Amino acid sequence: MSIPVICLAGPTAAGKSAATLALAARWPIEIINVDSATIYRGMDIGTAKPSARERQLVPQHLLDIRDPAESYSAAEFRQDALRLIGQIIQRGRLPLLCGGTMLYYKALKEGLNDLPQADAAIRAQIELEAAQSGWPEMHRQLAGFDPATAARLSPNDSQRIQRAIEIHRATGQTMSQLLAAERPANDSPYEYKTISLEPSDRAVLHARIAQRYRQMLDMGLVDEVRALHARSDLHVGLPSVRCVGYRQIWSYLSGECSLEQAVEQAIAATRQLAKRQLTWLRAQPGRTVIDCLAPDAAGQVAEHAASIWAR
């Protein structure tokens, strides 16, 4: 019999942290963070990382596990998450996966295709070309040999464009060909149950996003990014610097725009991120949807969790 494991998902600013605290008040849970930004040390404010109080209330995993100069893949997340789930269950506690990085959920639930490892030399060459011609031009080149992948990527999605071009140069195959290949069998002993916090009114979520980002500025986000910007080993090609909300302030500190322009760009980028997260979630079968704008949203999450954990 499969062991049920709850995945608490939702777009940014949907109230996932409040819901986890409601669960922690009733059950002995441990949280496995499903977030590609909170993994980085020194990036606390802009990632809405759990506070010291929240960490005291409930154990948190996969926070601060990488320096911003380092990378972390979906494959590494899957390996770490499966290990942690097993350890938490062995301790007689309940694992709760919580976050908004949908690629990580996909890797955990479905397994991964056998994609080649990163090639530093090829990546460096692609970055050099992009610095000269721009990522929209690199996107146009990608469309020439892998139109399927290019069609689902923004012309400014540097990280994924780079990866798709890298794979083609390293293997002679396109990313779409490799992703279409049969995945290894997913023999996980766990049954993942998704509780999805989604807004009944997207405009209200957008207002929340703007309010939260401006609160981050009041908390010292610019100084947090300034400390990263001062490091000689960090640059805009790194996943950490490209995180939504950080890349825009980085541009301001580099003299590319005003602070107010950076803020507006960051809010717009965060709203686009939320849109992508919701698109992915709405394609998931069997998820339980709870209106994140409901006054009792956290209580509804707890009620549904009870029905799963009681089995």
Image (spheres, rainbow, N blue to C red):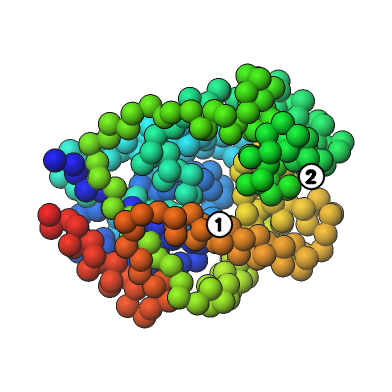
- Residue 53, picture quadrant: bottom left
Q: Hey, what amino acid is under mark 2?
A: Pro
In the structure shown, which secondary structural element does the residue marked by tag 1 occupy?
helix
x and y percentages locating residue 44 in the rendered image: 53, 54
Foreground: 89 or 271?
A: 271
The N terminus: image quadrant? top left
Q: Residue at x 61, y 43 (%)?
A: 240
Vertical side of 261 occupied by 141: above or below? above
Is 191 in front, or is 54? 191
Tell me the number on the disc at residue 102: none
Reply above or below: 75 against 2: above
Quadrant in which the C terminus is drawn: bottom left
Say left or right for 162 vs 67. Answer: right
- Is residue 188 shown above or below 52? above
Residue beneath the point at 83% across and 59% down = 257
The amino acid type found where label 1 is placed reads Arg
Say whether residue 1 is left or right of residue 271. left
Tell me: 170 left or right of 55. right
- Residue 276's label in the rendered image is 1
Q: Residue furthest right?
A: 132
Counting from the top left corner in percent of width and height, residue 220 is at 62, 62
To which residue does mark 2 refer?
136
Q: Please tell me how crowded label 2 is: few (under 14), some (14-19), or many (20+) other residues with Cα within 10 Å.
A: some
Helix, strand or loop at mark 2: helix
Q: Residue at x 55, y 22 (%)?
A: 116
